[in-house]
Image (cartoon, rainbow, N blue to C red):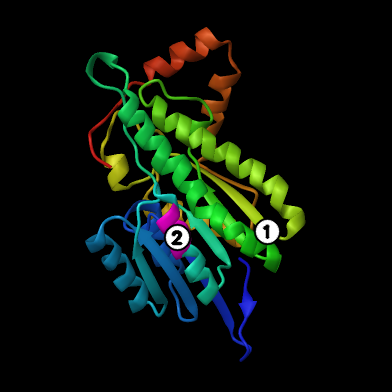
Amino acid sequence: MLRRSSPGGNDIRSILITGASSGLGAGLAGNYAAPGVHLVLTGRNAERLEATAALCRARGATVTTGLHDVGEAEPLGSWLVEQDQRTPFDLVIAAAGVSAGTGDDDRPEGVALAAMQVRSNLLGTIHTIEPLLPRMIARRAGHVAVISSTAALRGLPYSPGYSASKAGIRAYGEALRALLRPQGVAVTVVVPGFFDTPMTNRWKGPTPFMLSLDKMVAAVRKGLDAQRSRIIVPRLLAMGSQAADLMPAPLGDRIMRGFRFRIEPGQ
């Protein structure tokens, strides 16, 4: 990952992670925590966020936390710029996210659930990154990571709002990467499949190629350290989704309908 040098010559790493109170965000925070690393962590659950922060401090990192809903652009953006002024970010990981699905008897999600996922996942990613881009471009330095999903590769019929939000994140990240690379800012699009988190625990159905949280974190960290353009884990699940997308639509739809699941209420 990118580093900047302090006046004393020591390497300092400043990392922002949203969604750090649970799941991939919390896992990456713990993985990056080390002496000389400054972590800025956000989440919505104060107790879980503090637990993540305590773990990171125990591993030698300095930590700043903030309770923020990434769907609220202005307070989040102002706080992020303030943090970047104090310790300019080398790496920004937009990991906050929620999920939901269709109701019993395949009833549509409805406006509220679908919009909630787009607001938190897609708009939350945009709200995190856009306020920081002018500063990163001015420094001609920095690395941004967005967290998409294999659901972005071929929409899942039982979670259309989630699929749409993650497809939007993927397109946004791909577009940003092409735009920002000549300006000195790297962008990585992360496309994970199933891995063990509280969000996945609410998924009632098949979870092919399921990974532990530690294995997913290790794979994402490895790709981010190498500043890869895309991190797709596991590839076999992604290839299956892409194959379904390339098939004639009626055939692909039939296959995806057979992949039945329900997502229990919660975030």
Give the residue displayed 40% in from the left and 53% down from the top: 24
**Magenta span covers which residues?**
74-79
SS assignment for the magenta stretch, majority: helix
Look at the numbered disc 1 and give the secondary structure of its residue.
loop
Whichever of callouts 2 and 1 sits on the residue coming sooner in the sequence is 2
Q: Position of residue 148 (x, y in %)?
A: 50, 41
Q: Is residue 214 left or right of residue 222?
A: left
Amino acid type shown at disc 1: Val
Q: Which residue is mark 2?
A: 17
Query: Residue 174: in sight, yes or no?
Result: yes
Q: Is residue 10 left or right of residue 54?
A: right
In this orientation, which residue lies closer to the viewer: 205 or 33? 33
Q: Position of residue 136 (x, y in %)?
A: 64, 63
Q: Which residue is mark 1?
A: 185
Q: Position of residue 259 (x, y in %)?
A: 38, 21
Residue at the right extreme of this rendering: 182
Give the residue displayed 53% in from the left and 40% down from the top: 169
Amino acid type shown at disc 2: Ile
